[in-house]
Image: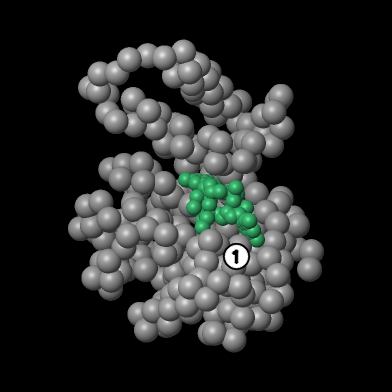
Amino acid sequence: EAKAQGRNTLCFFDPQMQATASARSLLEADLRQALARSEFLVHYQRLVDADNRVLGAEALVRWQHPQRGLVPPMEFIGLAEQTGLILPLGRAVLRSACEQLARWAAHAASAHWTVSVNVSAHEFRHPGFVEQVLAILQETGAQPALLKLELTESLLLHDVEDCIAKMQVLRSRGVGFSLDDFGTGYSSLTYLKRLPLDQLKIDQSFVRDVLTDPNDAAIACTIVTLAQSLGLDVVAEGVETEGQRQFLLNNGCRCFQGYLFGRPGPAEALLQP
Ligand code: C2E
Ligand code: MG
Ligand code: MG
Ligand code: MG
């Protein structure tokens, strides 16, 4: 696609491309309007320990579209990133998640729950990112130590020094960092050692066939061992069956997320066992 190749690329227009381009600008206008109308909402999916006790939740954005119903993030996050709309959208998600943290903090049963928020490359690279996170924590009264920001390997590969500097400022206030979809990117072990991370998330693509594909099993176990060696927590994502959970547990993983424990849903659903 032309845009992906850069703005100065010359190319011929075919009708298919034109259809795609106009569908995109429609979606972009729709996204802008959705932000103005606050049509985005945040669902939460639990993270549990080896005894299935809730440790916290991941905040996952959804678009409550007036005609299309609940639209999953894969259908709009990419465009939101390309258009810069991810900045106001990401702020709205972070604010909701921090407000939720403050609500959980008010009840003994949920006072220790963490919230994990996905941060896209565009957001993290924005010069005002650190100040914005600190401002939202302050305004919502959420405890920084209960907030985890989920970054990806590709995001961290670009300008590592700047990433480390930003992470260190937030970390000095207590904010934690998780490396999402781990194993699917290209992080070098040299970088991994230097990044001030707290947690690795084993990507669900390795968990899916962990019982049937020896390569996936080897990768999942290696990530657990790597995390342990680096002193990081490790979470298995996309756990759907008791067999997968048992295998990961037997191989040292103590934290899980997946449909087996609960699908993403409204925050209130986390209070139900
Ligand atoms: P992710 O951060 O890796 O989130 C995990 C995804 O796996 C979620 O999809 C979740 O619903 C799904 N999932 C959880 N358990 C299972 C399972 O057992 N089986 C399967 N097959 N899937 C499971 P979702 O909510 O559609 O989000 C997709 C991606 O969109 C996220 O992947 C994340 O990269 C991005 N995303 C979601 N919310 C936000 C956000 O607020 N900001 C940004 N920048 N990205 C977001
Ligand atoms: Mg995530
Ligand atoms: Mg993930
Ligand atoms: Mg992802």
Instruction: Indicate the position of residue 133 as horizontal and vertical percent values.
Output: 41, 50
User: For the point 60% across and 31% down, which residue is it?
Assistant: 38
Give the camera-side residue of 240 and 219: 219
User: For the point 37% across and 68% down, which residue is it?
Assistant: 197
Location of residue 114 (image quadrant): bottom right
Q: Is residue 103 visible?
A: no
Location of residue 128 (image quadrant): top left
As drawn, which residue projects farthest toward the right?
272
> Does 25 appear above or below 200?
above
Give the camera-side residue of 170 and 224: 224
Give the camera-side residue of 249 and 66: 249
Instruction: Indicate the position of residue 231 as horizontal and vertical percent values.
Output: 39, 81
Label 1 near ligand 1 (CB < 8 Å): yes
Instruction: Indicate the position of residue 48 as horizontal and vertical percent values.
Output: 64, 72
User: For the point 37% across and 28% down, which residue is it?
Assistant: 1
Q: Is residue 192 visible?
A: yes
**What SS does tag 1 mark?**
helix
Q: Which residue has dot 1 on it?
A: 208
Circle 1 residues within 10 Å: few <14, some 14–19, many ≥20: some
> Does 69 appear above or below 46?
above
Instruction: Indicate the position of residue 224 as horizontal and vertical percent values.
Output: 46, 78
User: For this view, does 49 lie left or right of residue 4?
Assistant: right
Mark 1: amino acid: Arg
User: For the point 69% across and 76% down, which residue is it?
Assistant: 243
